[in-house]
Amino acid sequence: MPSPSQRPARLGLPDLGVGLGLRIPHYPHVFEQKPVCDWFEVISENFMVEGGRPLDNLDRALADYRVVQHGVSLSIGSASPLDWGYLKKLKALTRHTQTPWLSDHLCWSGSDCTNLHDLLPLPYTEEVVRYVAERARIVQDFLELPFALENVSSYLTYTSSRMSEWDFVRAVAEEADVGLLLDVNNIYVSAENHGFEPRTYIEAMPHERVVQIHLAGHTRFERYIIDTHSGPVIDDVWSLYELAIERVGPVSTLIEWDDEIPSFDEVHAEARKAAAIRARVAAGAAQAAPPRAVQSGAA
Amino acid sequence: MTAAAEPTAPADLAELQSFLGEVFRRPTAVAQDESLSRRAALYVAGNDRLSPAEQVDIYRRQFWMRHDDCLREDFPALCVLLGEEAWDALVEAYLAAFPPRSPSLRDLGLDVPTFLDSWDGLPRARARACKDAARYEVAFVETFDGRDPPPLDPARIAALTPDQWERATFVLSPLVARLRLGFAVHQLRASLRDAKEVDVERWLQSAERDVYVALFRKELVVHYEELSADAFAMLDALARGRALLSACAAIAEGKSDEDAQALAGSLGEWFRRWASWGFIAEVVVP
Ligand SMILES: [Fe+2]
């Protein structure tokens, strides 16, 4: 395995700019007006069907836009065996979409044959790192595609955890040799719920493994925050995003908005904010860089 | 790649997931159950604002909200027929009897008709309408995103000689659901889709009759078509692999000569429409 300094940024995957999650209320606007959007993320499970309207909608998106697949049901941390029927369907869909990479969550969603359709946190232990990393390797090998795991937001912690969440995420990614989908809002939500410093988390990530970033809104209740993907991204999360871009460099960024979804333009305004932050960080980096002649002798 | 290559889960991870997988599906608050709260505290840490049981309850509530929302979306007619209280009871009992197993929420309600057959919580006066609605709404889910059969060349049907017509059997498209109902639940669902106010009590009085419906997908849209009893019987016989002549004879049995002739006269029109709606996936001439 190459050392961090030898690994290319984003594990060599392209920076697609700032995209949006493709959502049903926006279909008429997207398919008819074809608005400018760097790329769309689709939820794999919505299109793992045999035919009909969903696949037609997917093809319409593929005809005009770059599409990246994101899954919610892999359950990489489940104690039950991997679901090979699911994985075969997933692989077939990746062939259809030509997704440049594929992501799902570092979580468990069920065991003993049930599926709770949730993204449940794992206990942070060395044994779980080894177990999950081995399964992630198997999945990546089977899919024959770069695979990325996303950090989830959580509302509970386990008595059995023996390390911080960021050490756990980092260890799984390194041991599995997979990418990371860094959800900055999830870091904020978990930090508020469990009382840690979100900047420490971002600093601790293996930055060259971050192939994508998620941004979203959340909902604050009296004693905890839930990752509802509702409302705009809050200022504190934008600051964390700026830090992430400073550390990772320009990386494909995606706005998730799944509850009380407003107009396409309103969601796209969030994408423009992200693009502005990326541009500001890039300009700052260019200013801070040594003069060009010294930087490289190559033509 | 074989399952043998997969690692074995750490025993304590499996134990934790078994415990939480069960308590997340409980209908009542863990925090209100003392012994369960103590067990939850073995696995879940809690913090200065939330006890371990309260943390578990966040996920537990989400389990119910998520699956209730999904079932409401797939069963709008069943939901209004039951009313809020009976609906809540149904969701609780159904998810206990048929815990979600599929990676896709699309499959969540597929067992509702089977479940209703033995559930004693249905309001007696509405039991038939509820069962009809459940069957119809599951058929809707399956028709919506099922696989299209390979297209049948219309020339294949046009080219059949009268003799071949009589002997031919027809393979119906898997995207055609045939439903014999005691209530016109297809109309109830259509009214709800159009956001019309429905007075359920009045609807029940006006909608009870023998209804024969074909639910099918054409150009990506799911349509329903009410059929006559004879047309439905014909479609049913063809779906079971009977040749046209034998199906006609079976349906005409016991009919007056006049009715039998009318039946024969309708056949051409039925086939023309069924073919144009894509009901016929294949023609087999022995
Ligand atoms: Fe996310």
Image (cartoon, coloured by chain):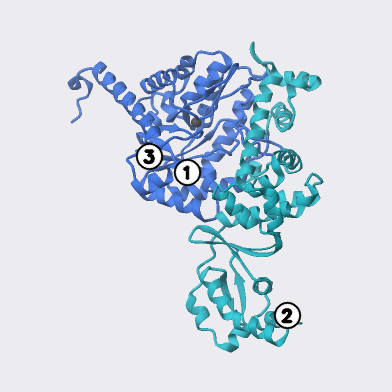
Chain colours: A blue, B cyan
Q: Secondary structure at mark 1?
A: helix
| Viewer-side residue, A236 vs A186 | A236
In the rendered image, the quadrant that contains the C terminus of chain A is top left
Asked if residue A262 is positioned above or below residue B171 in the image, the reply reads: above
Residue A274, label in figure: none
Q: CA distance from mark 3 to mark 1?
A: 16 Å
- Asked if the residue under mark 3 is in contact with the one under mark 2, i.e. CB atoms within 8 Å, the reply is no
Q: Is residue B32 left or right of residue B273?
A: right
Residue B167 visible in the snapshot: no
Q: Which residue is painted at 44% across and 35% down in the image?
A: A262
Q: Relative to the observer, which residue lies in front, B80 or B145?
A: B80
Tell me the kind of residue under disc 2.
Ala
Residue at the (47%, 33%) spot, across then down: A257
Spatial separation of the CA atoms under disc 1 and disc 2: 47 Å
Marks 1 and 2 in Cβ contact (< 8 Å): no
Q: Which mark is residue A39?
A: 3
**Residue at 62% over, 31% down:** A131
The x, y position of residue B189, in whole percent, is 61, 52
- Residue type beneath disc 3: Trp
Q: Callout 1: few (<14), some (14-19), or many (20+) C-alpha neighbours within 10 Å?
A: few
What count of labels does the image hold? 3
Residue furthest front as drawn: B202
Please tell me the numbered disc located at residue B250. 2
Is B272 in front, or is A295?
B272
